[in-house]
Amino acid sequence: MCGSCGCGSAAVITLLPDRPVPAWMGGRGRFSRRAARVRYLHPRDPARSDVLLADFDHEQVHTDHEHTHHEHADHEHADHEHGRTVELQQKVLAKNDDLAVRNREWLRERGILAINLMSSPGSGKTTLLERTTRELAGKVRLSVIEGDQETALDARRIQAAGSRVIQINTGVGCHLDAEMVAHGLRGLDPPSGSIVVIENVGNLVCPALFDLGEEARVVLASVTEGTDKPLKYPHMFRQADLVLLNKTDLLPYVDFDMKQYMADLRIAAPDALLVQISATTGDGVQAWYDWLRRRVPAPHD
Ligand SMILES: Nc1nc2c(ncn2[C@@H]2O[C@H](COP(=O)(O)OP(=O)(O)OP(=O)(O)O)[C@@H](O)[C@H]2O)c(=O)[nH]1
Ligand SMILES: [Mg+2]
């Protein structure tokens, strides 16, 4: 899991004896500081775009790791023959879950539905959201939270397509968390009766662990990633309400076994709906639009 921020709280890490122990695990290595920034891009007015809404870091979270480490060092560190095993604490995830509950309440009180869109890097999340923005304009009120380690490139694409958008840059972090999304939601201020799609940082591992307060989870896979992903990344697929299999226009050119994929997905995510799409050509996207439209919440007065 993500060693940079220690978010894999239940992870067991084995350090080889000749490697320096990083500071957050009690060694003298460099302390890893994780910053996050939230920026707003107005859909039409560049003068009101790129406003820095929040600039915060997660030093406290890391300090908690350190603190816990020193307090419980005797219990948690076991010396093994070939290394040192450290069990990290559940604190980060527990704190995140509390904040996610608050996000969910915040959204429910306002009649807003949030969807957590997750995938590997480059599966086509932003391409799909650009098309969705254009094709559902005037039918569904949509806004987007963009999560990337750096740049506002994806937010600018969404802005150009016409949706309200907030970019969250996670620095070294490899996933969004509920605190970042809370900042993003307040900056975005989506209207009642609308949908917010949260494009998570491209990563098939860590985002699956972090509840953001969403109502539904969508995993976007693509045929160029290979057939075996549901079995190799079961945590990501297990929690999906909908799996979109993208880039089907490339099926004639890639080695992808659709029958095997469907069978494996049934094992990893028995209840997930599978929809085959091409975000580039638009094939199959109507089923995604129908799925979205069925979930539009009633606006509050
Ligand atoms: N052939 C084909 N290419 C696609 C399709 N969808 C996206 N792409 C291409 O895939 C590349 C990555 O697309 P993005 O939409 O940026 O992917 P992403 O998941 O948002 O990427 P990250 O935000 O970096 O994780 C781009 O070159 C897209 O043009 C598709 O359905 N078919
Ligand atoms: Mg993207």
Image: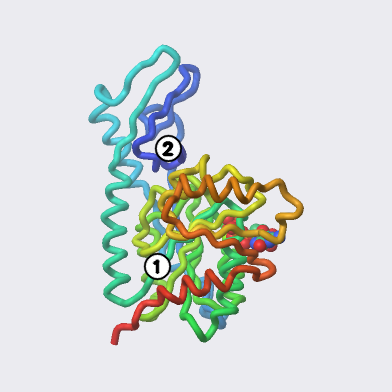
Query: Which residue corresponds to the image point at 67% horizontal and 48% vertical from the top-left?
Result: 256
Residue 36 lies in quadrant: bottom left
Query: Which residue corresponds to the image point at 50% horizontal and 62% vertical from the top-left?
Result: 199
> In the rendered view of the protein, which quadrant contains the C terminus?
bottom left
Q: Amino acid at mark 2?
A: Phe
Picture coordinates of residue 208, whole percent (x, y): 43, 49
Q: As drawn, is 104 to the left or to the right of 174?
A: left
Picture coordinates of residue 201, whole percent (x, y): 51, 54
Depicted 4 relative to depicted 28: above or below = below
Report the label total.
Answer: 2
> In the rendered view of the protein, which quadrant contains the N terminus?
top left
Q: Amino acid at mark 1?
A: Ala
Q: Residue furthest top?
A: 81
Return the residue at label 2.
31
Q: Quadrant of ligand 1?
A: bottom right
Q: Is mark 2 within 8 Å of ligand 1?
A: no
Depicted 86 relative to depicted 34: above or below = above
Query: Which residue corresponds to the image point at 29% horizontal and 58% vertical from the top-left?
Result: 99
Rendered image: mark on residue 114: 1
Q: As drawn, is 254 to the left or to the right of 297?
A: right
Name the element at disc 2.
loop
Foreground: 99 or 211?
211
Rendered image: mark on residue 250: none
Q: CA distance from mark 1 to mark 2?
A: 34 Å
Q: Is mark 1 within 8 Å of ligand 2?
A: no
Depicted 263 relative to depicted 248: above or below = above
Residue 86 lies in quadrant: top left
Crowding at label 2, few (<14), some or many (≥20) Cα neighbours within 10 Å?
A: some
Depicted 98 relative to depicted 293: above or below = above
Picture coordinates of residue 89, whole percent (x, y): 30, 37
